[in-house]
Image: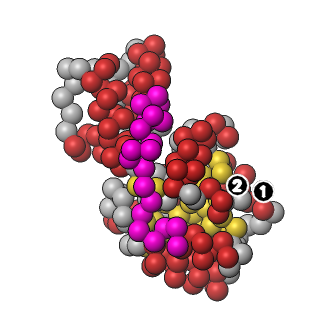
Amino acid sequence: MVIIFDLDGTLLDTYELIKASFIHTFQKHLPEYQYTDEELDSFFGPLLDESFAKLTKDEKQISEMIKTYREFNLSMHHKYVKTFPYAKEVLEKLYNENYKLAVLSNKRRDAVLLGLDITGLTKYFNIILGSNDVTQVKPHPEGIFKVLEHFQTSQAVMVGDTAYDMQAAQNAGIVGIGVSWANTSVEQLQKSGAHYIAHDYLELYEMIKGVNRNV
């Protein structure tokens, strides 16, 4: 069976990195913008152009903001990025038990690979897809279908922390496991189609084993 993982908020704890990247970008391009913590959190998940389009309709400014965000974000990976508790141990077990592991992120592939390399997780994954590897990102199922085609199977689980992840799983017709250790509420994950909710990596491991037994 294939296990497809989202990256930010699922495999990697990048909350402080993303938050710092948005704050840096706003300070440079929109210094008058007064944001709340709730507004900052609302930018987690959507594509950057969608997030910045809420604040300005100037296409050139949006492009400059995306450039600023990405440059700062990449330069600060080593300072901020870390794994969630037991993530590496569970990936090791799944890998050794011959599960096929994949990453599907709405982030650009270079940033995905950087985060995985820094945390030592790259070796566990057979295929890694970022936003520039697909024409339509999550919640569209294209990325999931690419992973399934790669492994020549229809048996898969999508693990993610956002509504986009659960909707993508639903749109692809596979099992979605929502994780509660990031910013999305359990209620929102369930409303978005999550079949199961995991509260930590050890529970996630048992859920994956259970799904596999029932396939």
Instruction: Answer above or below: position of 1 versus 113.
Output: below
Say left or right for 179 vs 183: right
Instruction: Answer above or below: position of 46 versus 64.
Output: below
Closer to the camera, 125 or 198? 125
Mark 2 secondary-structure assignment? strand
Residue at horizontal 41 percent and vertical 68 percent from the top: 85
Disc number at residue 127? 2
Q: Residues within 10 Å of mark 2 (few under 14, many from 20)?
A: some
Range of residues picked out in magenta: 70-89
The image quadrant of residue 203 is: bottom left
Where is residue 128? Give x, y as percent: 66, 51
> CB under 8 Å between callouts 1 and 2?
yes
Visual colour scheme: secondary structure
Three-letter amino acid code of the residue under disc 2: Ile
The image quadrant of residue 169 is: bottom right
Residue at horizontal 81 percent and vertical 63 percent from the top: 152
Residue at horizontal 27 percent and vertical 24 percent from the top: 27
Where is residue 194? Give x, y as percent: 47, 67
Three-letter amino acid code of the residue under disc 1: His
Say left or right for 112 vs 143: left
Which part of the image, by quadrant, shows the N terminus? bottom right
Residue highlighted by disc 1: 150
Say left or right for 168 vs 8: right
Residue at horizontal 41 percent and vertical 38 percent from the top: 76
